[in-house]
């Protein structure tokens, strides 16, 4: 017997690995919260004509953070006039290279103030600081840098056409990536010579309002960007309906997307919709399994699964299903759920109570319809909105958890035998935003990608974003593209100058 063998046999049975970390809280000091936030219209803060304010909270502690103005119809009208006037007198005819300078300034200010933005985003949204710090904020800055580069090159982006801006864009954003969605919308709008009115989601207005400060810091001409806050059905509805709006860019639920499409019909307003999803993440037997496990975890637990392109349906080839499910269960048990401001946190708080209830209701339906639930043991904080990372096996295609968007940390696992069956099952959904393919074979990646009815297909990775790469959906996931050269088009009349 060698020395090594002797020592190993003397060791106690390996117990479950411990994944304890000392607390590593990010300080909140850098954020200077105001008690009250007014509307940002025509380059300055104005009190809402409604006189009303609503509370915005920290979903991890259910503590109020600040009061935020509720914009009424009159306020929407003021913002629309300011944006219209700014477009006609200060922005439309500014040379592209001058517009670019403002965009570069905004991008640099975002970088300089990145920690402030990251901490505030995690406080108001509940997402882990490591995600807001490493993903949301750097990507937001990258979008401004990227579109700054296009501002003076539009005629090269569309050779032989005469690109002209549309006018005032109404930009309505969701609560899952509050700052990043503002950047996705503002950067291409400004680069192309449009002015904007931003309406952030009512549960996460704070980083959009901080972005308004950055607009002042960049000395953007007044009225080019306006930020109005308030409830979706009222403030958002009035904004979308305002006659001075030339274009609506919306990210949010399919339900509201349909409402907007109906309301816009016949008005001549341009519309792009980025809606929900139920993405397939497909694991073939020849995939690098450990990497795939990380990709699956990133696909569905990144941002608590509150991601429109989340890999919420996992399709595993039958021959490797057992090993994938076993490894996933063990990996789930290592996820640290808790304080969003702790640098070690993997899964933070759900953004709002309604969303938490929606997740719980859908998970309950999974249990009732006969799927088998697995949740790791973990201690959840007493206050705040929390949901354990969850996976379901024995899922069939007809189950609600396999069809409906849950928008939470819940994975439904199904199996397949052949590539054809994988294609058939993956495309069997009303949505079509994204898909993931895990295989060692390049030819199979191309074969699959061609057949996926999804706007974005990731190969041996998931949830990767780049400002140069267009993003958007098919079917009930919406239409129009954000990012890349494609992302300029929705903000331009391409034959505006043609005779
Ligand atoms: P939502 O569609 O109601 O809200 C999105 C944005 O639209 C918010 O700014 C909201 O204030 C605004 N809005 C709401 N009603 C409006 C109206 N009638 N006219 C104009 N604007 C309006 O989404 P939600 O209620 O926050 O979330 C519900 C579901 O939507 C979630 O469970 C999730 O499935 C989905 N969702 C998807 C995304 C995405 O990125 N695709 C983002 C957020 C939510
Ligand atoms: Mn809603």
Image (cartoon, rainbow, N blue to C red):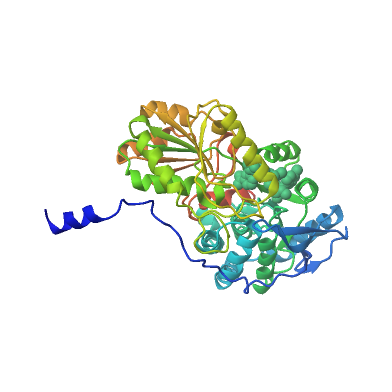
Q: Quadrant of ligand 1?
A: top right
Residue 243 placement, left or right of 271: right
From what the image shows, is residue 137 above or below residue 362? below
Residue 391 placement, left or right of 289: right
Q: Nearer the viewer, residue 127 or 461?
A: 127
- Residue at 81% from the left image edge and 55% from the top image edge: 76
Residue 351 placement, left or right of 324: right
From what the image shows, is residue 184 above or below residue 220? above
Q: Nearer the viewer, residue 420 or 349?
A: 349
Instruction: Please count the marks in the image.
Output: 0
Image position, residue 227 (x, y; %): 73, 60
Q: Nearer the viewer, residue 69 or 356?
A: 356
- Residue at 73% from the left image edge and 53% from the top image edge: 202
Is residue 263 shown to the viewer in this render?
yes
Residue 77 placement, left or right of 7: right
Image position, residue 1 (x, y; %): 11, 53
Furthest-left residue in this view: 1
Image position, residue 459 (x, y; %): 39, 44
Is residue 493 shown to the viewer in this render?
no
Residue 215 quadrant? bottom right
Image position, residue 232 (x, y; %): 75, 48
């Amino acid at each position: 017997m060698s020395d090594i063998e002797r020592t190993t046999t003397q060791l106690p049975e390996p117990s479950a690995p411990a994944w304890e970390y000392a607390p590593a809280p990010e300080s909140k000091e850098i954020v200077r919260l105001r008690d009250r936030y007014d509307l940002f219209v025509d380059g300055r803060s104005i009190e809402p004509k409604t006189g009303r304010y609503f509370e915005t909270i920290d979903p991890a502690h259910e503590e109020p953070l600040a009061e935020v103005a509720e914009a009424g119809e009159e306020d929407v009208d003021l913002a629309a006039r300011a944006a219209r006037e700014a477009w006609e007198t200060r922005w439309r005819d500014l040379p592209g290279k001058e517009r670019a300078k403002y965009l570069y300034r905004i991008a640099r200010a975002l970088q300089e103030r990145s920690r402030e933005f990251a901490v505030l985003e995690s406080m108001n949204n509940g997402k882990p600081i490591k995600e807001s710090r490493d993903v949301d904020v750097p990507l937001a800055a990258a979008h401004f840098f990227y579109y700054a580069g296009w501002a003076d090159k539009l005629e090269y982006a569309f050779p032989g056409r005469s690109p002209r801006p549309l006018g005032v864009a109404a930009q309505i954003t969701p609560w899952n990536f509050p700052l990043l969605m503002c950047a996705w919308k503002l950067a291409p709008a400004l680069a192309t010579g449009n002015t904007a009115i931003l309406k952030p989601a009512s549960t996460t207005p704070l980083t959009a309002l901080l972005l308004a400060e950055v607009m002042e810091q960049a000395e953007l001409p007044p009225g080019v960007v306006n930020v109005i806050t308030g409830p979706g059905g009222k403030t958002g509805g009035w904004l979308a309906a305002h006659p001075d709006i030339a274009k609506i860019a919306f990210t949010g639920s399919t339900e509201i997307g349909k409402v907007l499409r109906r309301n816009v019909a016949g008005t001549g307003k341009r519309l792009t919709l980025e809606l929900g999803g139920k993405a397939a993440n497909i694991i073939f037997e020849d995939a690098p399994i450990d990497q795939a496990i990380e990709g699956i975890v990133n696909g569905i637990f990144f941002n608590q699964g509150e991601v429109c392109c989340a890999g919420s349906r996992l399709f595993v080839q039958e021959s490797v299903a057992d090993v994938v499910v076993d490894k996933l269960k063990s990996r789930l048990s290592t996820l640290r759920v808790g304080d969003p401001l702790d640098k070690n946190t993997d899964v933070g708080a759900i953004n709002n109570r309604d969303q938490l209830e929606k997740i719980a209701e859908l998970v309950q339906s999974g249990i009732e319809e006969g799927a088998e639930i697995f949740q790791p043991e973990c201690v959840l904080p007493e206050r705040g909105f929390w949901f354990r990372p969850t996976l379901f096996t024995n899922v069939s295609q007809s189950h609600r958890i396999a069809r409906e968007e849950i928008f939470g940390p819940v994975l439904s696992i199904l199996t397949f035998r052949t590539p054809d069956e994988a294609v058939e099952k993956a495309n069997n959904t009303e949505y079509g935003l994204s898909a993931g393919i895990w295989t060692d074979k390049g030819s199979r990646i191309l074969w699959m990608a061609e057949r996926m009815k999804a706007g974005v297909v990731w190969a041996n990775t998931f949830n990767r974003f780049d400002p140069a790469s267009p993003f958007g959906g098919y079917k009930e996931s919406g239409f129009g593209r954000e990012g890349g050269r494609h992302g300029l088009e929705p903000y331009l009349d391409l034959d505006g100058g043609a005779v």
